[in-house]
Image (spheres, rainbow, N blue to C red):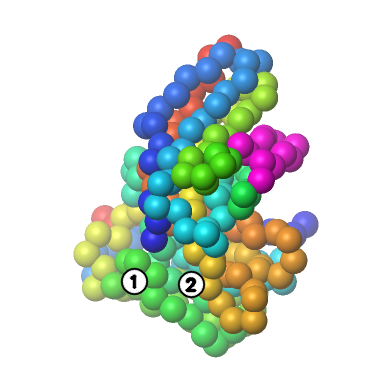
Amino acid sequence: DAKTTQPNSMESNEEEPVHLPCNHSTISGTDYIHWYRQLPSQGPEYVIHGLTSNVNNRMASLAIAEDRKSSTLILHRATLRDAAVYYCILRDVWGAGGTSYGKLTFGQGTILTVHP
Amino acid sequence: DGGITQSPKYLFRKEGQNVTLSCEQNLNHDAMYWYRQDPGQGLRLIYYSQIVNDFQKGDIAEGYSVSREKKESFPLTVTSAQKNPTAFYLCASSTGQGASNEQFFGPGTRLTVL
């Protein structure tokens, strides 16, 4: 599986933007870039995913480098509820008939601390 | 409400005993997964199932077994052969159909071997 590299931890102040980087230099052409986050003692929660173009949703934005070897998760205005471990994951695609059931391979992620 | 339920939330087991963790989903998803998480670590895949009556070993399947007799259920048995079973266990499901590829996770079961 292609690997990702993330900083161990980052800090931010409430209501400021946060940029969480991820390097994935061995990404293949069919790997999707997924981001999940996990609050303490809870299951992970999907945040966003993309393939080549930048993506936006209600939670965050995903900026993908032109060569796809890195990406950045952007939280536009951090809140205390955004404090979590953020995982950048490359998703393998497997299954027949064009249906993807890709497993997720989690690294250690980035611990985001948000200060009031 | 649609989602994934895991029970129990906390489980204690004596060394040498088998224990079964429950995972149920009402999302009508075909694929289901079991992950294990150790303190300060990311999740590691134990088993996955693409469809009823089919399942595959993940990265750390030794000492675990699963079944998939119904679409909505994917129980995990931690056997006495698992050397270090104390961990946080997470079940997930997903569908590859349509535009969404996200996995939905349950709240987890924290297993402690005494």
Residue at mark 1 to residue at mark 2: CA–CA distance: 10 Å
**Is B97 drawn above or below residue B3 in the view shown?**
below
How far from the left and from the top, in percent, is residue B39? 34, 43
Left or right of residue B74: residue A47: right
Residue at the front extreme, as displayed: A67
Disc 1 crowd rating (10 Å Cα; few below 14, some 14-19, many 20+) is some
Mark with earlier residue (1, 2): 2
Under circle 1, the secondary element is loop
Is residue A93 on the magenta stretch? no
Q: Secondary structure at mark 2?
A: strand
x 62%, y 49%: residue? A52
Name the residue type under label 2: Tyr
| Nearer to me, A65 or A103 | A65
- In magenta, the rendered stretch is A53-63
Q: Is residue B28 above or below residue A71?
A: below
Q: Left or right: where does residue B52 sit relative to residue B48?
A: right
Q: Which chain's residue wears label 2?
A: B
- Picture quarter with the C terminus of chain B: bottom left
- A56 to the left or right of B11: right
**Residue drawn at 44 percent across, 34 percent down:** A110
Residue B68's x, y, as percent? 54, 81
| Mark 2 lies on residue | B48
Q: Which residue is mark 1?
A: B61
Residue A54 location, quadrant: top right
**B47 over A105 or under it: above or below:** below
Q: Residue at x 73, y 40 (%)?
A: A57
Image quadrant containing the N terminus of chain B = bottom right
Residue B69 placement (x, y as % from top left): 57, 85
Closer-to-camera residue (B99/B86): B99
Picture coordinates of residue B79, whole percent (x, y): 31, 73
- Say which of B41 and B8 sits in front: B41
Specify whether residue A42 is in view.
no
